[in-house]
């Protein structure tokens, strides 16, 4: 591991001894694959059956990975992180709603966060998920070029309006806006929509950021084509580069339906694709701004090296490093201490509604070789340093 990330005193400076112990306990639990599988199933059942498990969830996974149940709740965390030079991206993590009320609610929450962000230097970005603004099936149909019924057509118009309202407000308030990426079979329609938003609102600088998942082997080509369009038409591109969170689902669906999986054939191929893409972006910083959402030390280190090679200041406003709350503090806090732009995603929402997010985090930490071990090793090192 690059030495800069080994400083656990800086990494965990904000954690009390008790919080450090809870994190250690939690990652030990998460490291146990059968336990996570059973735990996820039991929790889903308990939540659906309205059993009183929210207190238990709050005291364990929720308080580690989430900043609160509403925006106001998150503010102490935002202020705490900011003391160490780490910015916050409030992430309303309620997923997969299929009726109009929650979709309009997600819009209202994001617009409200933009207002918060305008007033708070510690919050340079807002974020939303495409399926927070429209039904999954609608994106899927649109992307596949299937015809809409009359009611679907007006439903889609409302989705477009939600995107427009958010991007316009972000532009008017001069707050950047990240738009998450999801499953490949809904993503084409989202990409098309976000591209349109960039064309409209990124005339002077990148306000709107789309997300590309580099576990997909086709994304660098996609970005190259987009870069050509942007250069020709005179707009800027904002890119959040991530590896991708839906690996198993993607591969399973491709196999079931008998098409070539959109996912790279190995972790190494994904890593190379990610690293090649950030190199490409650094060569096109005149048109592309980068938010590197990763917990991978090698990729973070590579980005630092590339910035040095291209003589870009650590705090250049076109480059950001991003991690999730409760994960990879050794990257976030050490980078911020060295003067880089760093932001943490702060997931929030009612406990039962953020469960899909939390279960994904637990599963990801279980299935990704090394990630839990790495967190555990660092926590162990810090416990030893503090003589706990
Ligand atoms: C700030 C932030 C924002 C994010 N936003 C999004 C988002 O909008 N959409 C989204 O999908 N994800 C998002 N993620 C999650 C992200 O995609 C990854 O799942 C997660 O960060 C783990 O990848 P990593 O780069 O940290 O590194 P690592 O831990 O080094 O890599 C793990 C990743 O590698 C890939 N991988 C693992 N095994 C294989 C294999 N056998 N073959 C091919 N690839 C493999 C998978 O993508 C896996 O998640 C976000 C993450 C962060 C930190």
Image (tube, rainbow, N blue to C red):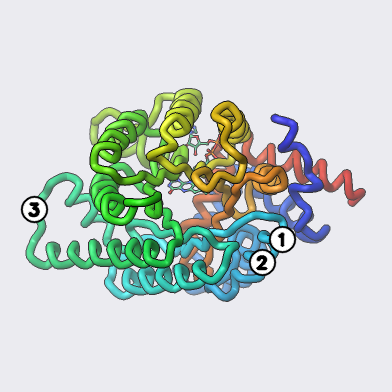
Q: Which one is in front, 198 or 145?
A: 198
Q: Residue at x 78, y 44 (%)?
A: 8
User: In the rendering, which numbered label is found on residue 79?
Assistant: 2
Query: What is the number of callouts on the image?
Result: 3
Q: Residue at x 49, y 63 (%)?
A: 354
Question: Could you tell me if residue 158 is visible in this image?
Answer: yes
> Does the beta carbon of the residue at mark 3 sit less than 8 Å from ligand 1?
no
The percent coordinates of residue 103 (x first, y second) are 32, 69
Question: Could you tell me if residue 256 is visible in this image?
Answer: no
> How busy is the neighbourhood of tag 2: few (under 14 within 10 Å), some, or many (20 plus)?
some
Q: On the image, numbered disc 1 is attached to which residue? A: 83
Whole-angstrom CA distance, mark 2 to mark 3, is 48 Å
Sooner in the amino-acid sequence: mark 1 or mark 3 = 1
Q: Residue at x 38, y 57 (%)?
A: 129
User: In the rendering, which numbered label is found on residue 135?
Assistant: none
Horizontal placement of 252 versus 266: left or right?
left
Whole-angstrom CA distance, mark 1 to mark 3, is 52 Å
Up-down: is 217 above or below 34? above
Horizontal placement of 108 versus 370: left or right?
left
* Label 2–label 1 contact, CB within 8 A: yes
Element carrying mark 3: loop
User: In the rendering, which numbered label is found on residue 147?
Assistant: 3
* Label 1–label 3 contact, CB within 8 A: no
């Amino acid at each position: 591991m690059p030495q800069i990330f080994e400083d656990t005193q800086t990494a965990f400076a904000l954690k009390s001894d008790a919080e450090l112990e809870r994190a250690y306990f939690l990652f030990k639990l998460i490291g146990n694959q059968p336990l996570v599988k059973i735990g996820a199933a039991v929790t889903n059942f308990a939540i659906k059956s309205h059993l009183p498990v929210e207190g238990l969830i709050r005291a364990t996974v929720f308080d580690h990975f989430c900043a609160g149940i509403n925006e106001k709740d998150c503010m102490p965390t935002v202020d705490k992180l900011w003391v160490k030079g780490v910015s916050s991206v409030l992430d309303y993590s309620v997923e997969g709603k299929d009726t109009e009320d929650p979709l309009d609610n997600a819009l209202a929450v994001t617009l409200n966060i933009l207002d918060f962000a305008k007033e708070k230097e510690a919050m340079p970005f807002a974020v939303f998920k495409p399926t927070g603004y429209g039904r999954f099936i609608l994106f899927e149909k649109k992307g596949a070029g299937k015809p809409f019924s009359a009611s679907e057509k007006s439903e889609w118009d409302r989705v477009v309006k939600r995107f427009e309202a958010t991007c316009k407000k972000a532009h008017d308030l001069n707050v950047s806006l990240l738009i998450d990426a999801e499953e490949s079979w809904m993503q084409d329609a989202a990409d098309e929509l976000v591209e349109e938003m960039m064309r409209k609102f990124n005339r002077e600088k990148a306000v709107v950021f789309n997300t590309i998942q580099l576990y997909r082997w086709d994304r660098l080509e996609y970005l190259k084509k987009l870069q050509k369009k942007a250069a020709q038409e005179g707009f800027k591109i904002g890119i959040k580069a991530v590896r991708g969170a839906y690996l198993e689902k993607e591969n399973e669906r491709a196999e079931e339906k008998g098409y070539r999986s959109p996912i790279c054939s190995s972790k190494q191929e994904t890593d190379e694709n990610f690293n090649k893409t950030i190199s490409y972006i650094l060569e096109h910083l005149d048109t592309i701004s980068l938010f590197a959402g990763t917990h991978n030390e090698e990729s973070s280190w590579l980005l630092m090296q590339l910035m040095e090679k291209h003589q870009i200041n650590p705090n250049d406003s076109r480059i950001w490093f991003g991690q999730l709350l409760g994960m990879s503090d050794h990257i976030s806090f050490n980078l911020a201490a060295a003067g880089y732009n760093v932001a943490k995603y702060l997931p929030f929402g009612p406990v039962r509604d953020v469960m899909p997010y939390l279960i994904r985090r637990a599963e990801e930490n279980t299935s990704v070789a090394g990630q839990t071990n790495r967190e555990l090793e660092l926590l162990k090192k810090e416990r030893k340093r503090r003589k706990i």
